Image (tube, grey):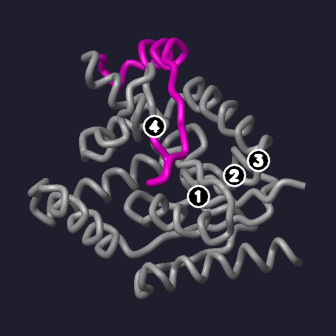
């Protein structure tokens, strides 16, 4: 039986970096599903397509070749063969990704790809509907979160390191708007699965968060 770990949680919870570290400790691959939606959002912005136009976004998704590849420094995301990994973490792309992810046909196509990948190998998958939709039978399910102010602080510091100067208040406002959109979308909204273990990292260090999830996953694997 495959060892699949599913991690859900809101924006800024540190899912990608924490998941990378957990997967490395456990010796399995990590699939960042959010990057796939970000790649679609980025492409829509580049092409001048209104992300609120569901028909055009669904058409774009069906025509677009989005791929992922695991390299020494983690997952790289590709659109039509172009590595867009360094372009998909801006606030504009975040909001575009949140918008396009609301559409049922977009999610259906992305889930199909994600389930196929997870069936082929032991894998940790993170996103916003992994426990509830993508991998409902995962070995271990985690809901990773933190207080909005702490998530915004982490995002703000991350942006500063990349030379992106934004007022903290704006980052917090955008994060809350993203939470609202993700939790209230009509298709597979962000929510904690009933059998997912809650990990609140507000007062935990990065390493403490990683260790907590590894302990949960190992207990599920051997339990």
Residue 61 x, y percent position in the rendering? 50, 20
Which of marks 3 and 2 precedes in the sequence?
3
Residue 191's disc number = 1
Residue 109: image quadrant is top right
- Label 1's element? loop
Q: Which residue is mark 3?
A: 121
Question: In this rendering, would 108 be left or right of 85?
Answer: right
Q: Which residue is mark 2?
A: 132
Instruction: Compute the Cα span from label 3 to label 1.
Output: 26 Å
Which of marks 1 and 2 precedes in the sequence?
2
**Disc number lying in front (2 or 3):** 3
Q: Nearer the viewer, residue 181 or 56?
A: 56
- Label 2's element? helix
For the residues bearing labels 2 and 1, Cβ distance under 8 angstroms: yes
**Disc number lying in front (3 or 1):** 3
Which of marks 1 and 3 precedes in the sequence?
3
Where the N terminus falls, by quadrant?
A: bottom right
**Disc number lying in front (4 or 2):** 4
Q: Which residue is mark 4?
A: 77
Which of marks 4 and 3 precedes in the sequence?
4
**What span is in magenta?**
49-77
**Disc number lying in front (4 or 1):** 4
Q: Is residue 204 above or below residue 88?
A: below
- Is residue 75 one of those drawn in magenta? yes
């Amino acid at each position: 039986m495959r060892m699949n770990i599913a991690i859900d949680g809101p924006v800024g919870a540190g899912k990608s970096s924490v998941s990378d570290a957990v997967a490395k400790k456990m010796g399995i691959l990590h699939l960042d599903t959010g990057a796939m939606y970000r790649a679609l959002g980025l492409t829509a912005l580049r092409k001048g397509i209104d992300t609120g136009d569901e028909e055009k976004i669904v058409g774009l998704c069906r025509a677009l070749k989005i791929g992922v590849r695991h390299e020494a420094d983690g997952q790289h995301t590709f659109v039509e063969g172009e590595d867009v990994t360094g372009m998909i973490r801006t606030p504009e792309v975040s909001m575009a990704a949140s918008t396009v992810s609301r559409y049922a046909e977009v999610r259906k196509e992305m889930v199909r790809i994600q389930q196929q990948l997870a069936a082929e190998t032991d894998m940790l998958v993170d996103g916003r509907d992994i426990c509830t939709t993508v991998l409902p039978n995962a070995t271990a399910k985690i809901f990773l979160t933190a207080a909005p102010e702490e998530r915004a602080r982490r995002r703000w510091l991350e942006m500063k390191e990349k030379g992106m100067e934004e007022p903290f208040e704006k980052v917090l406002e955008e994060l809350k708007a993203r939470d609202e959109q993700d939790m209230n979308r009509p298709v597979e909204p962000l929510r904690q699965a009933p059998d997912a273990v809650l990990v609140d990292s507000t007062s935990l260090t990065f390493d403490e968060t990683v260790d907590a999830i590894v302990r949960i996953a190992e207990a599920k694997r051997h339990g």
